Image (tube, helix red, strand yellow):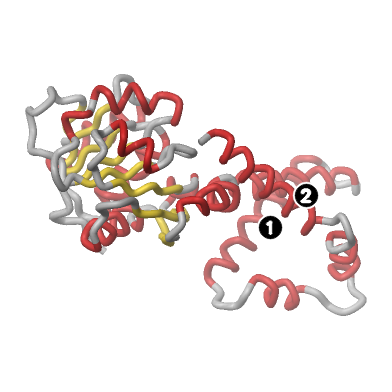
Amino acid sequence: MSLAGAGPLALVGAGKMGSALLEGWLACGLEGRQVQVFDPNPPTESRDLIARAGVALNPAPGSGPAARVVVLAVKPQVMDAVLADLAFMARPGTLFISIAAGRTIAGLRAALGGQAPVVRAMPNTPAAIGRGMSVAVAGDGVTSEHKALATALLEAVGEVGWVDDEGLMDAVTALSGSGPAYVFYLAECLAEAGVRAGLPRELAERAARVTVAGAGELLHRSSLPAATLRENVTSPGGTTAAALEVLRAPGGLGEVMARAVAAAARRSRELS
């Protein structure tokens, strides 16, 4: 996938996710001179990437070519102030892509004058290694060309899916947006269980980390459903079956995970 010719593009916010997006775009052929970054205090790593790529950092308004796409990668709580400063970018046809959790398309469009085409997307942190999952929804005025461009930009850091109902973004946030934290916590719990079973902590933590990472990679590479991969590890009457009997009991992992995702989705709705 090449992003050559996808610009001019403006990236607002060069934190961890913004920087991951920028790195992915550059790796996919977007030229640094086609990008402008707006961030009053980017992290050192982001600043170094911007300098190496020849990307303009905080140029004066109107000093460069009009952006074809503006990607909003700032925290939700500062979005209003940011949009007030960048209203000059809302030109006819300019696409805005927001990755701010909880910020609705209607609210973003209103802050941009009411006419801007807006795509709302939720990536997750594995985007930093090009293995993210982004789910997006298109607002009024978003054309098929806009959707194709948004898909290409998000695919630079992983896989992309689309929903038609913005209300589903709360569930997306709860599942894939917050999901990496659940997996990291699983690794923590596995390590602690190993310590309780008598393993030295260093070995337990390393074994848990490698096991979770290896299982995730196997799931990524395999075309088989997760349930089939689980069954392939489980011999009848064996050790794995004994463990799964506990995990799958009433009130076990499945029910706990369902409650966790529901709680995250509920909080996402509250924040919006």
Q: Is residue 111 above or below residue 180?
A: above
Instruction: Check whether the beta carbons of the residues at disc 2 and disc 1 lie within 8 A of each other.
Output: yes
Q: Is residue 111 above or below residue 104?
A: above
Secondary structure of residue under mark 2: helix
Instruction: Kindly identify which residue carries mark 2.
Output: 190
Residue 20: name its quadrant: top left
Measured Cα–Cα span from mark 2 to mark 1: 9 Å
Which residue is at a point 51% across and 51% down the rendered structure image? 167
On-image quarter of the N terminus: bottom left
Secondary structure of residue under mark 1: helix
Q: Nearer the viewer, residue 216 or 60?
A: 60
Q: Name the kind of residue labelled 1 in the image.
A: Thr
Q: Where in the figure is residue 225, as x and y percent of width and height?
A: 62, 75
Q: Where in the figure is residue 160, as x and y percent of width and height?
A: 41, 60
Which residue is at a point 23% across and 59% down the rendered structure image? 143
Residue 211's label in the rendered image is: 1
Q: Is residue 81 above or below residue 67?
A: above
Q: Is residue 267 left or right of residue 240?
A: left
Q: Where in the figure is residue 64, as x and y percent of width and height?
A: 8, 33
